[in-house]
Amino acid sequence: MSRETLNLHIQEIKNELLVISDLVEKATIQSIESLKNRDSEAARKIYLADQVINSKRYEVENSVLIQIATQQPLAHDLRLLAAMLEIASELERMGDYAKGICKVTLNLGNVDIPIPIKEFEKMGQLTVEMLHEALDNFLNEDVPNARLLPQKDDQVDTIFKKVEHSIVHMMVTQPEMIDHSNLLLWVAHNIERMADRVTNICERTIFVVTGELVELESKPKKLIG
Amino acid sequence: MADTSIPNNNYAIETENLDIFYGNFRAVKEVNLKIEPQKITAIIGPSGCGKSTVLRAFNRMNDFIPGAYVKGSILFHGQNIYSTNVDPVQVRKRIGMVFQKPNPFPKSIYDNIAWGAKINHYPGSVADLVEESLIKAALWDEVKDDLQGSALGLSSGQQQRLCIARTLAVQPEIILMDEPCSALDPTATLKIEDLMRDLAVSYTIIIVTHNMQQAGRASDYTAFFTMDTDRAGKMVEYGLTEQIFTRPQHKETEDYISGRFG
């Protein structure tokens, strides 16, 4: 096996993950912005741009498979490639959640309904920060910080619960708004799920370095290794 | 050998502080290795790390090298095969070896297998033994109509399976394989690996290989050897193959299997 060739290709795939992550971060912020501004045109653009994220994910998948087939990586290299496959899939799903928010923008149109936009923006901001840090930790193989980062998810969860409560309250007090309130619940749900997927990226960082598959929740749980 | 019918431990072979010398040079040092029975154990490591030396010590093949001797012990059914009361010929009957290059005798296919049985005064039907050995070595279907044909007319892959059949005919418990596929093409290599898997139901197999993918594909356990600063080979890590290849515990193992040295 040629180390130089393998190292070069691994670096290329890492770079590609960074590009996808950047696209996802932008899509997340912009999708919430489109909701805030009730901007259907922007929402449509972000919706369509998700195809770029999807195709880049498949490019990463293809590159990883080529490296496994041609370079026969083992141990750390193999774990790294497997983790990158997984992370590409997580990022692609995060892109889908942003796309889902754009769909809500399009469906809501100019319907008169109070949107907890400050909360959505805060959740989105936290999620994007988490994603950024998670990718940094992954690339630097920073296990201590990868273990700590999911704690930020608790902040997202707290806001989510508050928003959920207020939307459900709106559903009860203004039943005529149920359909549209439900759309807002989906927005909250999508951002909350994005943050969960960042946690999955942190788990992969730990896997690459230690070979252990742990589930990062309030109490880390060892699955294998 | 002394009575070996009742094993006093669960291992096929167990080494205790094994050192192997060629004259003054200590080629291998302090190897403590427990080989699981009816499993395939791969020994991997860079050139010169002593893996073939260890393999050859397991059936006293090193006895043929002037000045070679061992310290420590190699236990087979609880008995040190290097004890003075042990007959090396008996050891080699029970611990057979297949070599890097197929080395059939320049005789017929049948005679290659029957040879061991004849000199050992095999009490049963030699023809049956030949057939049984060739079936076990997955060669029977290809040669059954030409048993009197020359073994040298077979392809390399077939010759290597013939050598395995010849080893099986002596009815060993352990089969040592020293780079058995290095002279074979990928198809013949996979046939040997499939055969090893079938044979491991009844036999213990220890294989030395330079081919990391082969060790990964074909073995249950892997022992990684490397050369120490005094040039003596040492065992760095030993464990389940799936663990060694995905989560090795030692940096030296990681570096070697990842192609960083060796």
Image: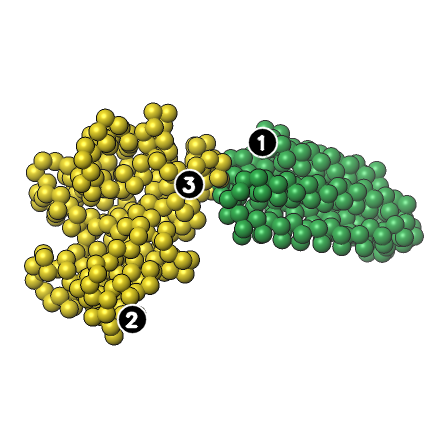
Chain colours: A green, B yellow
Disc 1 from disc 2: Cα separation: 56 Å
Q: Residues within 10 Å of mark 2 (few under 14, many from 20)?
A: few
Residue corresponding to mark 3:
B244
| 3 and 1 marks on the same chain | no
Residue corresponding to mark 1:
A143
Q: How many marks?
A: 3
- Which quadrant does the N terminus of chain B fall into? top left
Disc 3 from disc 1: Cα separation: 22 Å
Residue B99 seen from this side: yes
Q: Is residue A46 above or below residue A131?
A: below
Q: Nearer the viewer, residue A11 or A49?
A: A11
Specify which label sits upstream in the sequence, 2 or 3. Answer: 2
Disc 2 from disc 3: Cα separation: 37 Å
Residue corresponding to mark 2:
B141
> As drawn, which residue projects farthest toward the bottom?
B145
- Assess whether mark 2 and mark 1 are in contact (beta carbons under 8 angstroms): no
Percent x, y of residue B212: 42, 46
Chain of the residue displaying label 2: B
- Assess whether mark 3 and mark 2 are in contact (beta carbons under 8 angstroms): no
Q: Nearer the viewer, residue A38 or A208?
A: A208
**Which element is circle 2 on?**
helix
- Assess whether mark 1 and mark 3 are in contact (beta carbons under 8 angstroms): no
Q: Is residue A191 above or below residue B154?
A: above
- Which quadrant does the C terminus of chain B fall into? top left
| 1 and 2 marks on the same chain | no
Q: Which amino acid type is marked by label 2?
A: Asp
A161 vs A179, left or right, is left
Q: Residues within 10 Å of mark 3 (few under 14, many from 20)?
A: many
